[in-house]
Image (cartoon, rainbow, N blue to C red):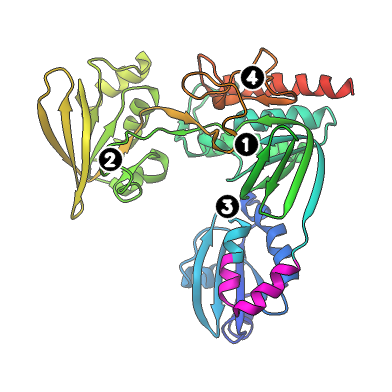
């Protein structure tokens, strides 16, 4: 692997044959997560593909000329021509391998594949999920000198990473940007000593035998497992919704509100998330129309008062979307009043859906006792019905789901696990 500057770019990259380039930055958690994967793959593919790193902060003109504005960004070249995918953010090993393989003949790929040796790691505890619950569990475990690994298919932070502002987390007088609170939590746990294995592909989770397989080659064994995989936005499951996801329909205001400056937006939902995010979207949009299935909002009173006082926000109560369709740049939403049965149609430039969450239990369904909504049941120590398996945060069956309750769950599970390990 070679580190270069803009001065060497033409010689090393454009005239370098098959090349993969990593534009990285300092103080960049996604870059830190990528580095060991990049180095490991250099050992496998380095005879066929040149691996190059460029410090983006000191080579900004070059980066901007290539339309690279974030770190890490990985691009692929063949004989001076850009090829393959442009990878950014939480880059997975499988994404790198896919693009590296595309540069080589099939026979050579088979030869390299045979050199990939399975890896086995041993830990006291494996934490699956890097949201507030998982990060807190990791913090308490490392402070107790427990050897723990935190695994996440994305980067640490969970849902709070894409939350605009968090105004009710103790210790902060001013509302905190979600991504910064996630960063503070993540850095604290990482510096403490919990081993991060993030932006990975989880191929298998065996709760009975206590092991996890990631990136199809590393098997991680543990004495205890803490499940902290959280929850994901729930779909309405009406025609057109999934087809237009990412193409007019969004589930993340922080991610996409900025694309609707002076445009009309529809928000579906009436809980805290829907109303608070609608207020945020209104900072950009010309008008926000909230569709809610009931005749009253379910959000807290403070959020309601703020929304009702916002002249940009309008409300359509007792109504549900029945179909989404896109024509040109407009989204057409067929609606139905659930009390009268009256049909209608609303038109907007974009739609944001906030109608609740569903637990992320797909990897281990069938093994755990759950409630009627699929959330995992635990006792007061966060222990599930399976020996040595704990569940914390939004994945757990409980009455309230907040950042503070997730942190509490992680604390309890870590203390419980530590005491259990001390009796071994």
What residue would you read off at disc 2? 351
What residue would you read off at disc 1? 129
Query: Can you see residue 287?
Result: no
Segment colored magenta? 98-115
Residue 412 sits in quarter: top right
Mark 1 vs 4, N-terminal side: 1
What residue would you read off at disc 4? 408
Mark 3 vs 1, N-terminal side: 3
Mark 2 vs 3, N-terminal side: 3
Residue 103 sits above or below residue 242 on the image: below
Mark 4 vs 2, N-terminal side: 2
Q: Residue 97's x, y, as percent?
A: 61, 65
What residue would you read off at disc 3? 90
Mark 3 → mark 1, Cα distance in angstroms? 14 Å
Query: Looking at the image, is mark 3 or mark 1 nearer the viewer?
Result: 1
Badge 1 marks a residue whose secondary structure is loop
């Amino acid at each position: 692997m070679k580190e270069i500057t803009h001065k060497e770019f033409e010689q090393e990259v454009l005239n370098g044959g098959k090349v993969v380039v990593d534009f990285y930055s300092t103080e960049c958690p996604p870059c830190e997560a990528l580095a060991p994967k990049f180095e490991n793959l250099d050992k496998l593919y380095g005879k066929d593909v040149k691996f190059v790193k460029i410090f983006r902060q000191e080579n900004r003109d070059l980066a901007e000329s290539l339309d690279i504005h974030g770190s890490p960004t990985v691009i692929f070249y063949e004989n001076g021509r850009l090829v393959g995918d442009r990878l950014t953010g939480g880059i997975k090993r499988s994404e790198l391998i896919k693009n590296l393989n595309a540069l080589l003949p099939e026979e050579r790929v088979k030869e390299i594949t045979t050199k990939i040796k399975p890896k086995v790691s041993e830990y006291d505890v494996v934490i699956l999920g890097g949201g507030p619950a998982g990060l807190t569990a990791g913090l308490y475990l490392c402070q107790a000198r427990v050897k723990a690994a935190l695994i996440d298919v994305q980067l640490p932070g969970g849902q709070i990473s894409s939350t605009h502002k968090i105004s009710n987390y103790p210790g902060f007088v001013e509302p905190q940007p979600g991504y910064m609170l996630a960063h503070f939590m993540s850095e604290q746990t990482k510096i403490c000593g919990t081993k991060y294995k993030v932006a990975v592909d989880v191929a298998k989770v065996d709760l009975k035998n206590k092991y996890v397989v990631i990136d199809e080659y590393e098997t991680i064994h543990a004495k205890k497992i803490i499940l902290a995989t959280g929850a994901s936005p729930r779909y309405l499951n009406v025609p057109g919704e999934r087809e237009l996801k990412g193409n007019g329909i969004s589930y993340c205001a922080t991610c996409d509100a900025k694309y609707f400056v002076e445009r009309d937006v529809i928000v579906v939902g009436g809980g805290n998330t829907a109303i608070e995010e609608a207020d945020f979207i209104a900072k950009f949009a010309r008008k926000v129309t909230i569709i809610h299935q009931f005749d009253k909002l379910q959000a807290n009173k403070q959020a309601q008062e703020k929304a009702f006082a916002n002249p940009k926000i309008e409300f359509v109560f007792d109504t549900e979307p029945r179909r989404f369709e896109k024509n040109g740049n407009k989204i057409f939403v067929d609606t139905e009043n659930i009390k009268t049965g009256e049909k209608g149609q609303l038109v907007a430039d974009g739609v944001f859906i906030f109608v609740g969450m569903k637990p992320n239990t797909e990897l281990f369904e069938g093994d755990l006792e759950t409630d009627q909504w699929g959330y995992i049941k635990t006792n007061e120590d966060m222990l599930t019905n399976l020996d040595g398996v704990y569940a914390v945060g939004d994945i757990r069956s409980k009455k309230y789901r907040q950042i503070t309750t997730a942190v509490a769950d992680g604390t309890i599970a870590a203390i419980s696990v530590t005491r259990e390990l001390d009796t071994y």
